[in-house]
Amino acid sequence: MRQLARAADVVGQVGGDDPEVLLGRVARGDEAAFEALCNAVAGMVLGIARAVLRDSFQAEEVCQEVLLELWRSACGFKQGQGNAMAWVATIAHRRAIDRVRSERRAADREQRAASHGIDYDQVAESVEIRLDRERVRRCLGSLTELQRESVILAYYGGHTFREVAELLGVPEGTVKTRMRDGLIRLRDCMGAE
Amino acid sequence: MRPNRTEPHSLVGPYVLDAVTPEDRARFERHLSTCSACATEVDELRRVTAGLAAAVASPVPDGLIAQVVRSAAATPQLTATAARFAWATKTAAVLAVVLMAVTAGAGFFAVRADHQLTVTQFREHQIAEVLNAPDAIMKTVRARSAGTVTVVVSRRERALVFTTEGLPRLPAGHCYQLWLVGPAGERSANMLPPSRNGMTSPVVAAGLTQGDWASLTVEPAGGSEQPTTAPILMLSLAG
């Protein structure tokens, strides 16, 4: 269970409030617990929305939607199964991804761009600036180039593995494997330090 | 056989990174439901993506959390059953619009402190079921007298949620009554609660049948068995 303790550390639980306990109280309609939960997770939620959407205004909207979604769906979190921060991060990331993908579809429809207009360098640069967690930065640095590019384009860039394959000019099967390998290596790296 | 391309488990990396289409996601989740080892792997890798999210955490603008907390006070929570649908549906958007209607004039997320609606006032469960239905649609119309009406209809739930804003204030001893009118006849659906700050909190009309319209009349307090005045609103509920 080394991973467990480490993961909690990695995702940086703020203050003395355990998000898992807070979520349980929120599920019972506890507004004070909800405020504490918001304080614990809002920075992460907003950060991931900013990274994916690259627009502060939209990111704040998504952040508000996600926090409210936590209030509404708190009972969907199964106590004792999975990590609360990971659950929150998943909801936030999916919401940001949904928004950015629907915008890209709209942009495609209007033929504003022949491609999505996003290349790896752009994504990597915008992430690099904000990656202020030394350990995560170091661990990303320990990946192979293809693993790192695949993970970054997917997670921070909001691209599907097929798009990533196209952007990087490698077969889809390779990208799928590199994504998994990259995540496993990150897990070991984050857990080992 | 091309195992790398067709074996569902090969999607575990893209799935955890949300680098999948909705179809891929559904396919992988079917696989996940039959493979406990995969569920463990997904849980472990999700901690990694949570780390990736935390690594880009950014300062939250003043007031954002306070606004959300105020909105939450006016937002019904889902029951465990309803919550299962919540991720996949666009409920939140629909709900947000209804809330906006409920808090009309105050703007999105700006629920005024003087008319915070509690969860219980919402008759939360029924309302959540309608708002959460995958087929829920929303309509806003002007009433004949004055004011606007916003409904969210789900045929699947055979119910609608009804809110109003700015309807004329009624003389003492009178109230608004909501009806369902259609091939199945004219049925009282609900009495509207007294308005607060010009708005009525949501009521549910259940037992919707094909071809029904919603209508609103002014009736003596306590309601009538059949409408006794001309409707101030007739709203088609067809999609």
Image (cartoon, coloured by chain):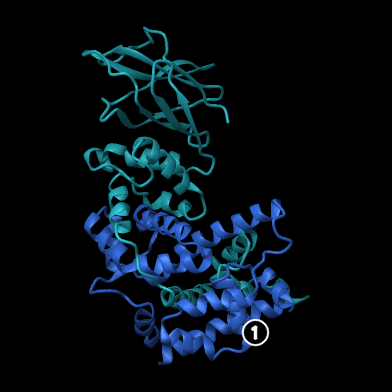
Q: Position of residue B11 (x, y in %)?
A: 62, 72
* Chain identifier of the cyan chain: B
Amino acid residing under circle 1: Leu
Residue A7 shown left or right of residue A151 in the figure: left
Q: Say which residue appears at 42% left-offset and 13% top-offset.
A: B231
> Which residue position holds label 1?
A146
> Helix, strand or loop at disc 1?
helix
Q: Colour of chain A?
A: blue
Q: x, y percentage for residue B211?
A: 56, 22
Above or below, B166 relative to A123: above
Q: State the residue at coordinates (32%, 48%).
A: B71
Q: Give left or right: position of B36 versus A19.
A: right
**Quadrant hosting residue A16:** bottom left
Query: Residue B50's x, y, as percent?
Result: 44, 74
Residue at (52%, 65%) from the top-left corner?
A54
Residue B13 visible at all: no
